[in-house]
Image (cartoon, rainbow, N blue to C red):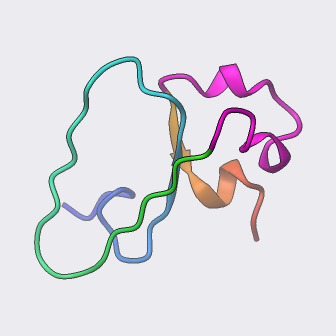
Amino acid sequence: GDGPRERSGYAEVAGVHPGLFARKLAGRGRVCGVQFRPGGFRPFAPGSPVSAWTGLRSDAAGALRLP
């Protein structure tokens, strides 16, 4: 399908995952990952405790309040 996590140009923010996870990548394109040091994500989400992100995934534009 063409769900929000499968379309071109999609970016997401994910908190610490409490276990192993896998992501299947297929077709053509690119992927980039960033891992922040403890407390490093805080400036991007000042309105909530970083612990609230544990196990969560969200569209980056909404999570970071981007236009």
Question: Residue 28 appears in which quarter of the rendering?
Answer: bottom left
The residue depicted at 72 percent of the width and 28 percent of the height is 50
Residue 67 or residue 40, whichever sits in front: 40
The residue depicted at 31 percent of the width and 19 percent of the height is 19
From the viewer's perspective, tell me whether residue 61 is left or right of residue 4: right
In this rendering, the answer to whether 36 lies above or below 39 is below
Question: Residue 29 appears in which quarter of the rendering?
Answer: bottom left
Quadrant placement of the C terminus: bottom right
Q: Is residue 44 found inside the magenta-colored segment of the image? A: yes
Residue 49's x, y, as percent?
79, 24
Residue 20's x, y, as percent?
26, 26
Residue 36 or residue 14, whichever sits in front: 36
From the viewer's perspective, tell me whether residue 38 is left or right of residue 32: right
Residue 66's x, y, as percent?
75, 65
Quadrant placement of the N terminus: bottom left
Q: Which residues are magenta?
A: 37-55
Q: Is residue 36 found inside the magenta-colored segment of the image? A: no
In this rendering, the answer to whether 19 lies above or below 3 is above
The residue depicted at 61 percent of the width and 46 percent of the height is 36
The residue depicted at 29 percent of the width and 62 percent of the height is 6
In this rendering, the answer to whether 66 lies above or below 21 is below
List the single residue furthest toward the front: 37
List the single residue furthest toward the left: 27
